[in-house]
Amino acid sequence: MEKIQFIQTTPKELQGEIIASVKTQLEEFLKHYKPTQPTEYLTRQQVAKMFDVNICTVNNWANSGVIRRLSLGSRIYFLRSEVEASLKPLNV
């Protein structure tokens, strides 16, 4: 094992060097870090509540292709990201 000796270095100076080095490494890491959002699935009721509409309206949107539905067995789900992406800005 290699030994390191600190001559004429105070504990405060050593602490400052360590902090500066860690800060540099964290900044470099954060430049390349892209967090991913977990996939969130919504039920028909949740989509209806989100837009304050009836479940029949959500079914009509799905049938007309406005939003895409997914199924697991007999359950119907919608991806939150796709539902939000289906919103279009109005040019007023």
Image (cartoon, rainbow, N blue to C red):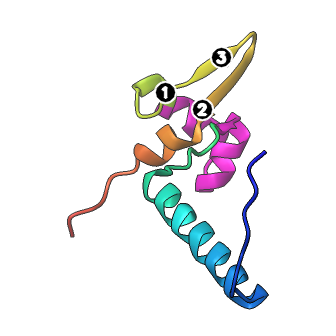
Q: Earlier in the sequence, mark 2 or mark 1?
A: 1
In the depicted view, which residue is nearer to us: 63 or 38?
38
Q: Which residue is mark 1?
A: 68
> Residue 33 appears at what percent x and percent y?
50, 51
Q: Is 80 situated above or below 52?
A: above
> Residue 25 appears at what percent x and percent y?
54, 61
What's the residue at 43%, 58% (across, down)? Answer: 31
Q: Amino acid at mark 1?
A: Arg
Q: Which residue is mark 3?
A: 71
What's the residue at 47%, 60% (across, down)? Answer: 28
Secondary structure at numbered mark 1: loop
Graded by Cα atoms within 10 Å as few (under 14), some (14 to 19) or many (20 or more), the crowding at tag 3 reads few
> Residue 74 appears at what percent x and percent y?
75, 12
Distance (Cα) linking label 3 and label 2:
9 Å
Judge left or right: residue 1 versus residue 50. right
Q: Earlier in the sequence, mark 3 or mark 2?
A: 3
Q: Amino acid at mark 2?
A: Phe
Graded by Cα atoms within 10 Å as few (under 14), some (14 to 19) or many (20 or more), the crowding at tag 2 reads many
Secondary structure at numbered mark 3: strand
Q: Which residue is mark 2?
A: 78
Residue range corresponding to the magenta coloring: 40-61
Graded by Cα atoms within 10 Å as few (under 14), some (14 to 19) or many (20 or more), the crowding at tag 1 reads some
What's the residue at 50%, 28% (across, down)? Answer: 62
Q: Is residue 56 magenta?
A: yes
- Res 30 label: none
Distance (Cα) linking label 3 and label 1:
10 Å
